[in-house]
Amino acid sequence: MPANPTTLFRIACVTLSGAALTASIGAFSAVPAAADSGTLTVTPPASTVIPPEPAARPVAGAAPYTDEILVTLRAEASASMKVTKSALQQAKAKRAIEMATNHLGDPYVWGATGPGAFDCSGLVQFAWRKAGVMLPRTTWSMLSAVKKKVSLAHLKPGDLIFTDGGGHVGMYIGHDKVIAAPHTGAVVRIDSLNGYWSSSFVSAVRPDV
């Protein structure tokens, strides 16, 4: 007689002492069947539980490396700010020089602050004010108030040069030239840095630094 098709998925059972001895195959587990039944009930495996992945562990040395990056970024930002501030100061200095040279030929008048006439401190105060920087009125107060001091060898355009013990001031315009309102009877003019300005040099300052 042909085998019943359902027997293809059954597992032979052997009746021993009134109990079913069952053989299991693969991932299926056998459930004891009634004696002499000749059948086996199988159940599918329980759902597999996948354990969560372990938390990532910090990589050794990661914190110092991150700190190094932050320090580098801060240094670059600081350097960028310094470059920007320096460029702005130079632009203002250029503007101050333009304002002063626009008044070449104007007469020196003691106490005058322009436009049309100037004394020495009045000229540089006027020029830098037009560039957006306020300076004190007198030479001594300028020398005291502007904190960035520079030497004669490191002058840049726009720097203020003081002579005669700090009682006279002119503005360096580059190329060894100084613009100033020199004295009574003279006019605003450009002179060489060499000579009077070098021999009588007391100090120099750089506004807006």
Image (spheres, rainbow, N blue to C red):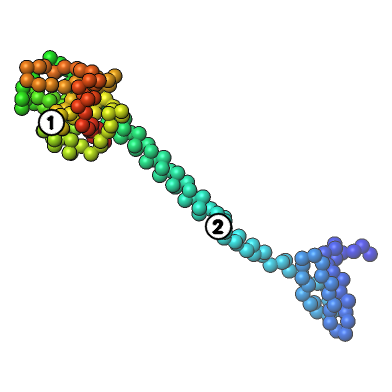
Determine crowd level at label 2: few under 14, some 14-19, many 20+ residues with C-alpha closer than 10 A: few
The reply to whether residue 38 is in sight is no
Give residue 58's quadrant in the image: bottom right
Q: Secondary structure at mark 1?
A: loop
Apparent side of residue 144 relative to residue 60 in the rendered image (left or right): left
Q: What amino acid type should be assigned to the residue bearing mark 2?
A: Pro
Q: Is mark 2 in CB contact (under 8 Å) with mark 1?
A: no
**Residue 25 x, y percent position in the rendering:** 82, 67
Which residue lies at the image location 28% right of the left edge and 27% below the top edge? Answer: 156
Q: What amino acid type should be assigned to the residue bearing mark 1?
A: Gly
Which residue lies at the image location 77% right of the left edge and 65% below the top edge? Answer: 27
Q: Which residue is mark 1?
A: 167
Residue 70's disc is none
Q: Which residue is mark 2?
A: 58
Above or below for 121 versus 104 = below
Cα distance, mark 2 to mark 1? 67 Å
Q: Nearer the viewer, residue 118 or 201?
A: 201
Apparent side of residue 165 relative to residue 109 in the rendered image (left or right): right
Mark 2 or 1: the one toward you: 1
Give residue 6's quadrant in the image: bottom right
**Quadrant housing the N terminus:** bottom right
Which residue lies at the image location 49% right of the left edge and 50% below the top edge? Answer: 66
